[in-house]
Amino acid sequence: MEISQTQNKAKRLKVLLSAYACRPDMGSEPGVGWNMARELVKHYSIWVITREENRFSIASELSQNPVPGLNVIYYDLPSWARWWKKPSQGVHLHHYLWQIGVYFLAQKLHREINFDLVHHVTYGRYSAPSFLSLLPVPFIWGPVGGGESAPAPFWQDFTFRNKIYESLRNLASWVGERDPFVHLTVKRSKVAIVATPETSLRVSALGAKRIEVIFGQTGVNQQELAQLGQLPVQSSQTPIRFVSIGRLLHWKGFHLGIRAFAQANLQESEYWIVGDGAERQRLEALTQELQIADRVRFFGNLPREKTLQKLGECDVLVHPSLHDFSPTVCLEAMAANRPVICLDLGGPATQITEETGFKVAAHTPEQAVTDMAKVMVDLASEPKMRVRMGQAGRQRISQLYSWEMKGKFLKELYTEIVQQGV
């Protein structure tokens, strides 16, 4: 265990954050953990407990950009208790066991520091407990997600292995909902912050006393907002270019985007796919089958700067995910003045509005593909609409999805909770 940064002696509220995922050089949940801490330290003295493997990235960032009042505590399980964990395997079990160890560490810290409030930030899974809820301190849980699932009709496109994955995912949620420690976490939470309506229903069924639906788990900081706003926007009647960005996994739904692009049959248009993963070979084969391989380009994994460059060279983001609860890529596309096409499911459906893009109903794969194809045709024929939607998207990000706005929401919530007491 090591604490970095000098503790702030000012009489500010002392807050303990649990952030299993927390890194300044990444997006998704690691970015959530880091940005949440960076924003909250403007108002409070913050202690963050995170994993040992995040030490190098955090220490490097703090050496260049010190953050007064931010104390980072690194913890991991003993080597004999984590020998089985691999980068892509055993993460959720490791997270569960890690939290048990963190509880005993937090007990000791609380005796020394006397925290005013405890907040579990990452991982944000509604079906996993936070043992920090057992501390005699007001406890906030979330934002959490994971209540989303792929609609049954869409399973017909999955391989046997993918169906096993979805079945195990649903089973894990079922088991989690019956975990007594999950129920204890819900019971002891002053507030459960959720990212999607689907998760809200699950958490409500678990008996949460108070639920706050926040606009997604992720956000965009001012530096990113400025950088994305500088990407050029094409407003003339030129061949349209679509882009999908993310891991090439079955539940990301990129196969639906490819099929819609083929059905739209837009001459000279292109569809770019940035990312890599287990589905790449199947997706490439699909483009051959649909005879559009000459207009669909796979770029694989790219550094962030080059990924943003590709986004800037495209007109519309296509993100037909089946159970994302807070994708950062949709926010980045809106911040870059790009409209978004998504399914009316999970997190993207809360991020996108009629003014900023298209939320396509997800009744069956055939219906979703046909409706997405119609949207692609409409966007291709109306460049002014693309510009208008892009501008509305950027405004929405500034108003609701900046980390500053999320920090303001949490500041008001913290004040209310602390005044109520344990």
Image (cartoon, rainbow, N blue to C red):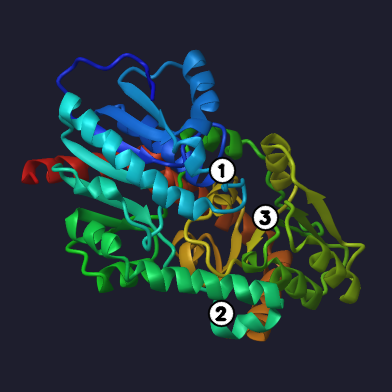
Amino acid on which the number 3 mark rests in the picture = Arg
Circle nearer the N terminus (3, 2): 3
Q: Which residue position is annotated with label 2?
A: 362
Q: Quadrant of residue 362?
A: bottom right
Residue at 51% in and 43% down: 82
Residue at 17% in and 63% down: 209
Label 3 CA crowd tier, 10 Å (few <14, some 14–19, many 20+): some
Identify the disc placed on residue 83. 1
Residue at 28% in and 49% down: 131
Q: Nearer the viewer, residue 48 or 134?
A: 134
Circle nearer the N terminus (3, 1): 1
For the residues labelled 2 and 1, the Cα–Cα distance comes to 42 Å
For the residues labelled 3 and 2, the Cα–Cα distance comes to 21 Å
Amino acid on which the number 1 mark rests in the picture = Trp
Q: Is residue 148 visible?
A: no
Amino acid on which the number 2 mark rests in the picture = Ala
Residue 54, given in percent of the width and then of the height, sits at 51, 31
Circle nearer the N terminus (2, 1): 1
